[in-house]
Image (cartoon, rainbow, N blue to C red):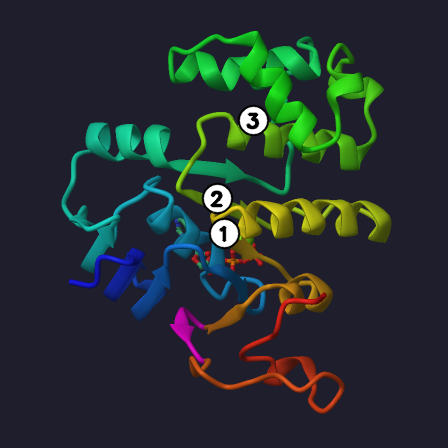
Amino acid sequence: MNRSNIVELKNVSVIYDTLAALQDVNVEVQEGEWLAVMGPSGSGKTTMMNIIGCLDRPTRGTVIFDGEDISGASLKTLTSIRREKIGLIFQQFHLVPYLTALQNVMLAQYYHSLVDEKEALKALERVGLKDRSSHLPKELSGGEQQRVCIARALINYPKLILADEPTGNLDETNESIVVDIFKGLNAEGSTIIVVTHDREVAQRAERVVRLAHGKVVTGRHHRHHHGAHSPQDITRAKPNG
Ligand SMILES: Nc1ncnc2c1ncn2[C@@H]1O[C@H](COP(=O)(O)OP(=O)(O)OP(=O)(O)O)[C@@H](O)[C@H]1O
Ligand SMILES: [Mg+2]
């Protein structure tokens, strides 16, 4: 077992009735990596994120998370791993509408039973929103709401940050702000897995895994040459800058 892998999927399948949402998927993600997951709608991206994020279990195959085989773990065990080690960010913001930005971030801490306003403010500061902390979600732009979600995901200093189309609802400016936050977090050592339909977002990652019909279709070590190929050919993009 490679100790530097935060997650390993070995021949993982997720079967819904007769439909294989994932089929014999093998993926390894090293600690400190920034991975993008791409693929058409219905190709199994969210299904894979749910397995990696300890929200679901595979029908078949092995899932190693942080050195621990969690393939057959109880939901209770999965929940505690998720709370301790994983920060989740979704396309839909899932903020509580009647709580301020600060309170929304603190609520995540409540789930970890750590209601600490200072830590929550620090998380908001990391995403550049300290001065908006007392605003309600409806008083924040879409980009700002997504940054609150990122702050909420960061509150527990997770080993792994999982984001499922985090920029899907954002304009280019906000997309770029969010991707820059990921870049900063990755530079600080966080492992990041981002599902995206957006080429620009994928190109900022270190590596792209592409799914089609529930199977991985990319090789691992190809280099992407900017402008030389169609988006389908992106296999390993260099981070910008
Ligand atoms: N709970 C479920 N029950 C039955 N089928 C499901 C379930 N969840 C997902 N599926 C099916 O599994 C396949 C993969 O779904 P998934 O959500 O992983 O796709 P995706 O790549 O995330 O797509 P999108 O880009 O649209 O978000 C789809 O055909 C979907 O209909
Ligand atoms: Mg999806």
Magenta stretch, residue numbers: 213-217
Point out the residue furthest to the bottom here.
228
Give how far apart the Cα atoms at labels 3 and 1 are.
15 Å
Position above or below: 135 against 64: above
Q: Secondary structure at mark 3?
A: helix
Q: Which residue is labeled 2 in the image?
A: 161
Say whether residue 82 is visible.
yes
CB under 8 Å between discs 2 and 1: yes
Q: Is residue 11 left or right of residue 31?
A: left
Decide: few, some or many residues near mark 1? Use Cα within 10 Å; few <14, some 14-19, many ≥20: many
In the rendering, which numbered label is found on residue 152?
3
Q: Which quadrant: the N terminus? A: bottom left
Residue type at mark 1 is: Ile
Residue at position x 58%, y 11% from top?
118
Image coordinates for residue 134, horizontal then vertical, percent: 75, 10
Q: Earlier in the sequence, mark 3 or mark 2?
A: 3
Q: Which residue is labeled 1 in the image?
A: 192
